[in-house]
Image: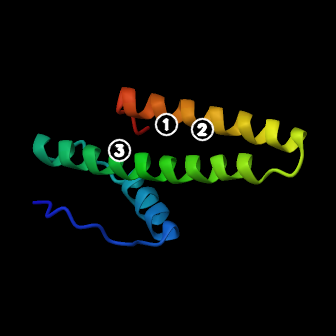
Amino acid sequence: MSNGKNVLIPTSLVKQIIDLLGYWDTANYDRAICDDYNDILLALNVKMEKLELRDAYSKIISANNEDRRHNARMDYLVQKSRLNDLMADGCIF
């Protein structure tokens, strides 16, 4: 189904989509629909985590003193760990 093209969607809209999908109860749907739902929600969550990780990294680079750089680095490492866990577990909840 994918044609390999990318589109630009505002981050705020992606967050709204993730929130909306998070409220849906797919327990009574066909297994194939549940699998697609979980795959899509996971992919959107991974995308958001990657965007947040990139922002966290830029805060390390732009920090104007060592304390802020250290704090930004710690935030980055926490976010990186969360992304790694999300990608390894495939858990969206």
Quarter location, residue 9 = bottom left
Between the C-alphas of marks 1 and 2, the distance is: 6 Å
Amino acid at the residue labelled 1:
Leu
Q: What residue sits right under mark 3 in the picture? A: 42
Residue 29: image x %, image y %? 16, 47
Q: Tell me, what colour scheme is on the image?
A: rainbow
Q: Which mark is residue 83?
A: 1
Instruction: Say what secondary structure mark 3 lies in.
Output: helix
Is 81 positioned to the left or the right of 57 in the image?
left
Residue in the image at 76% along x and 54% along y: 62
| Residue closer to the observer: 86 or 56 | 56
Whichever of labels 2 and 3 marks the residue nearer the N terminus, that label is: 3
| Residue closer to the observer: 5 or 20 | 5
20 versus 54 height, above or below: below
Amino acid at the residue labelled 3:
Leu
Q: Are the residues at dot 1 and dot 2 in contact (C-beta closer than 8 Å)?
A: yes
77 versus 8 height, above or below: above
